[in-house]
Amino acid sequence: MFLQKFLSTHLRYYINNICVLMLSFVLFACSSGQSVILNNVSQDSLNDVLIVLGDNFITAKTELRKDGSYTVSVDNSQKLKALNILSKNGLPKKTYVGLGDVFKKDSLISSPLEEYNRNIYAIDQEISEMLSSLNGVISVHTKVAMPKPNDKLWQSEVPKPTASVLIIFKQGARIDLYTNKIKSLVSHSVEGLIPEQVEVVSMQQRDF
């Protein structure tokens, strides 16, 4: 009776230890795996991403895709930290469409209104790309309003173009101190636009 109880107790002990070891092994395998955190990253953005992650002691692996873009992966244990750091730094940078891409030659003939909309979109994109290159800027949203085609035929006074810009910047960057210079840059990008008709709202990124 005593021997049976002794063996039963030790058997449970060994089984419990084996279960703990197996569970630890599974958890270790999961935590040591890789998670993809970014897809379709350009070469320029990739360099910025790797520098920021490296500065925060996060090792990232990259893989070149067939289309020339990259995927970025990190250890599972560092995934959330990496995503948070990239978000704070506005990475990867948004890709903007230039005038050449918007007005690609095609066989279709666009109407004046279609050309107007494409022109507005291209201007918005180029202004946003220009301002996003400023040091400390995380994201930029631009909206330009211009007189539509044929407005001059029936209006006694042609509406003046206007522009609105929203800038999110890193803590400590103080982009808000350069509002007048930003208005000047934007106004020189649109024919007939004056700095007084440019509204700039700059907001510092905050942790949530």
Image: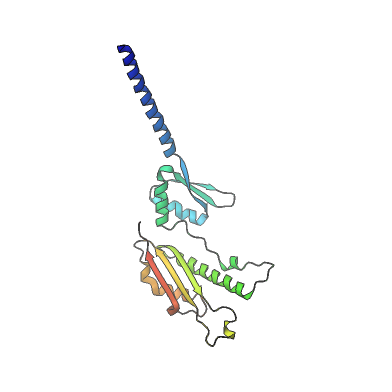
Furthest residue in direction front, as rendered: 1
In the depicted structure, whether residue 109 falls above or below residue 171: below
Furthest residue in direction bottom, as rendered: 156
Please give the name of the residue rendered at 45% of the width and 67% of the height, measured from the top-left corner: 131
Please give the name of the residue rendered at 39% of the width and 51% of the height, measured from the top-left corner: 55
Q: Position of residue 202 (x, y in %)?
A: 39, 68
In the depicted structure, whether residue 45 falls above or below residue 27: below
Query: Would you identify the image quadrant in which residue 7 lies?
Result: top left
In the depicted structure, whether residue 162 falls above or below residue 21: below
Q: Left or right: 88 with respect to 44?
A: left
Q: Position of residue 82 (x, y in %)?
A: 41, 49
Query: Would you identify the image quadrant in which residue 112 lies?
Result: bottom right
Of 48 and 170, the residue lying toward us: 170
Q: Position of residue 204 (x, y in %)?
A: 36, 64
Furthest residue in direction right, as rendered: 107
Chosen colour scheme: rainbow
Which quadrant is the C terminus positioned in?
bottom left
Which quadrant is the N terminus positioned in?
top left
Give the number of callouts: 0
Q: Position of residue 3 (x, y in %)?
A: 32, 12
Please give the name of the residue rendered at 38% of the width and 23% of the height, measured from the top-left corner: 15
In the depicted structure, whether residue 147 falls above or below residue 37: below
Please give the name of the residue rendered at 43% of the width and 68% of the height, measured from the top-left corner: 166
